[in-house]
Amino acid sequence: MLIVNMTWDREALPGWLFHVPWNDPAQGATFTDLVFPWFVFVAGCAAPLSMRSGRGRGKTRGELLSAAGWRACRLYLIGVLLTVASFAHETPLDWSHLLSWNILQLLAAAYLVVVVVQMTPRPWRIGFVAAVLALKWATFLLPYDAVTAWVTPRPVDGAPLGPGAWAHFDAVKQLINYEFAPAPTSGSRLLGWLGMMQQYLPLAAIGVIGALVTEELERKRDWRSVGAIALIGAALVAAAFALQAGYRSEGGGLWGVATVPFSKWFFSPAYCLLAAGTGSLLLAAFFAAIDLGKIEWLTPLSVLGKNALAVYVGAELSFKLVFGHWLMMTPTGESAPIASGVQAWLEAWSGSPALAGLGWAAMWLVGWWLIAWKMDARGWYWRA
């Protein structure tokens, strides 16, 4: 996340460092598109450990739910802070900004749902995942004519309209988010905020899969568990590719107009299964390497994990308030924000836009790793 948030030159850098454009009818998923759902997957992995043997040890369900609720509220409000930090110096704040959705807000809502679902029997948890993804898939089957009676589709670059097209799925998204009202009102803003369950419930399904995978890993804690998780991950990835097989932006594919792409923009079921499957494969690989293989050179990663929230909030706020605004001189004598200015100097020294972009991202990563390492050495940890 630290790296891909600091890469901007699409022409010079590899495509996997960038999101698929939200309004690209072809859709798809890159490494960058999977980073956020992996955060939710990891939160799900932690849930059964925390609830049973961590800070949740000996607590009643009510106490667990209360603690999770307050934690979700704090995460949500921190997310609102990060959201308004990018425009509050230009736009006056009002109460509606509390209804904004972004990374931490979605993570907070998904986390709370994961905790609630984790309190139910295992079959119910599996049923939750299946039901959420099936209902999400069903929204893409809402009749085109009925949806477009409320919402005007947004065609992109001459992309065709009609059932199963990108514009159809986008119109469904707008409809559920209540974005079809002529002018926003207090009521429409609240309805739109509630409509974001079409995003955080699929995210929660990814988190619940993470919890289920962790429980499987705990059964043996050996190579058999690693193999089982790898098989689960491979099955989820295969299912993901099957759901979007032959997808065409004008609508159609293996499942006709019900074929949906890998899409972070829509949080499609294919995308959620891809994120959960690749997350499972990564968990199996890291458990095999660190816990079973005892590969010690990977352990420096832990300092970032111990202070993930502090690093994320610190990186976001410092960029929005300082590195993206404070000015410095470039080699051409012009002024530019620090982030762009450093890249300009790196490009002047290296002669390569790609090396300059990657160099700045690497400096950002190393800088925050050093901060996390120093905090860990002093025993400073910030958690919600």
Image (cartoon, rainbow, N blue to C red):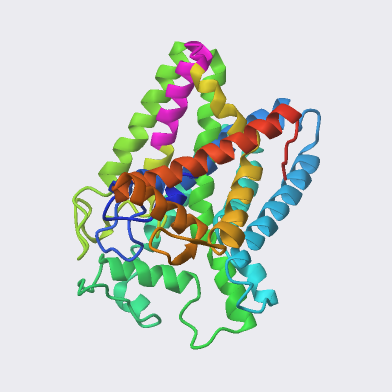
Q: Which quadrant of the figure has residue 163?
A: bottom left
Q: Which quadrant of the figure has residue 101?
A: bottom right
Q: Nearer the viewer, residue 82 or 160?
A: 82
Indicate the position of residue 109 as horizontal and vertical percent values: 61, 53
Instruction: Judge whether residue 128 can be spotted in this image.
Output: no
How many labels were placed on the picture? 0
Say whether residue 278 is magenta.
yes
Whether 371 is drawn above or below 169: the answer is above
Tell me which segment is drawn in magenta.
277-296
Indicate the position of residue 243 as horizontal and vertical percent values: 29, 47
> Is 340 situated left or right of 307 in this image?
left
Instruction: Judge whether residue 130 can be spotted in this image.
Output: yes
Whether 305 is drawn above or below 134: the answer is above
Indicate the position of residue 87 as horizontal and vertical percent values: 58, 71
- Residue at figure coordinates x 28%, y 63% from the top left: 24
- Residue at figure coordinates x 62%, y 74% from the top left: 190
- Residue at figure coordinates x 42%, y 20% from the top left: 228
> Is 52 situated left or right of 131 in this image?
right
- Residue at figure coordinates x 42%, y 64% from the top left: 333
Indicate the position of residue 215 as horizontal and vertical percent values: 56, 25
